[in-house]
Structures are given as structure tokens and as C-alpha cells.
Amino acid sequence: MSKDDLYAIAAAQRGYFRTGQALECGWTRRNLSTATAKGQIETVSYGLYRFAYFPATDRDDLYEIGTLEPRGSFTHETALTLYGLTDLIPRTTHFTIPPDAGFRPRPGITIHHSRITDDDRRLRDGLWITSPARTLLDGARSGLDPEQLLGAAHDARDRGLLTDEDLARIHSHYPYNLIVEAQ
């Protein structure tokens, strides 16, 4: 890999990158220090950097989390919000990571440990999010308000985010009539 490869990696992560990614691309710790001193990159937290020329967004906190643990996915109410399926503002960011992940809890983040298959995650605006079906199931299992789930399910179905297979899967796992059967 070349130093230019780091720019491509960071671009996919909205400017963020980990120390390990920089080292894999041929950067040295000295390069990181020099670029930081010149204002080309910013140190966000231990082991996390961002190229300074990337514009800030209202989701920077999510991009930071996603860069720190790329095997993780945003789930529960956070995923519902990212899909635009709820108007509630989550009190915490829900992030599900594999059981063997080393991601450490942080204030404002609720960590869930579970394996999420590739079929159950989607890349949306540079963030890994659980599929709409998995998101609804997680919300139901965690006790999310049934009215909120029902509204989200109807919106997801109307917007084509749920397939007939998804609807059947939800019905088989969730004991209540969360969604009106597909026509």
C-alpha cells in the first residue's frame, strides 16, 4: 500500500482513520506527528485521526465510532433514526459489536455484543447499520415502544425497505402483530 491509499481509506470514513491504517499504508508515527503539527490532520482521540480538510458533519460522532470498530453496526433506535423511520431522538447511541471486539464503552454509547451477518447489515452514508428487519427485531427484543415499532415497520414497508421475506422473518420472531401482512 502507498501513502495515497490512506487518503482513499479516510475518504470512505469521512476523513477519519486509525493509527494502524496509517502504518499499513506506509505512514510512520513521525509522519503523523509532522502532519498534525502542520495542521493537515487532527488528533481526535488516542489512535484516531482525521484529515483536516474534511468538512464536519452532524454525524461525526458516529463516523468516529464506526472507524474505531469497523466490524460494528449501529442498531436499535440509532438505526431507526438513520433510516428515518422514527422521529424520536435516541438518548444513547446503540452500537453492536462482535463478542471478541476490543471496543471500549464510552459515555453516551450503549454497546451490544452480537454477531451480525453480512445479510443483516447495510452500508449507508459510510456507516454500517443493521438491516431494517434486524433493526425492528432488535427494537422489539429490547422493549421499544410497540407503537413506535409499528409506525417504523409501516414506513419501512411503504418505502420498500422490507421484503416479503423480511416480513415473514419478523412475524416468526416477534409474537405480536407488528406489521400488517404483505399484500
Image (cartoon, helix red, strand yellow):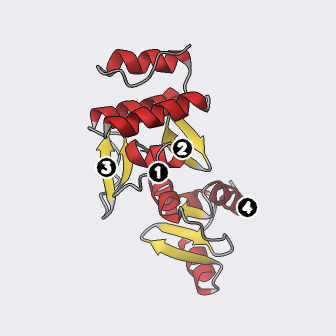
For mark 2, give the secondary structure.
Answer: helix
Residue on which disc 1 sits: 87
Task: Report x, y in % for residue 49.
Answer: 53, 69
Task: Report x, y in % for residue 16.
Answer: 57, 63
Q: Which mark is residue 4?
A: 4
Q: Residues within 10 Å of mark 1 (few under 14, many from 20)?
A: few
> In this view of the protein, can residue 117 be seen by the observer?
no
2 or 3: tag closer to the N-terminus: 2
1 or 4: tag closer to the N-terminus: 4
How far is the residue under mark 1 from the one under mark 4?
40 Å
Of badges 1 and 4, nearer the viewer stands 1
Task: Report x, y in % for residue 144.
Answer: 31, 40
For mark 1, give the secondary structure.
Answer: loop
Q: Residue at x 31, y 49 (%)?
A: 111
Residue on which disc 2 sits: 83
Of badges 2 and 4, nearer the viewer stands 2
Q: Label 4 amino acid?
A: Asp
2 or 4: tag closer to the N-terminus: 4
How far is the residue under mark 2 from the one under mark 4?
33 Å
Q: Label 1 amino acid?
A: Asp
Residue on which disc 3 sits: 111
From the viewer's perspective, is residue 39 above or below residue 64? below
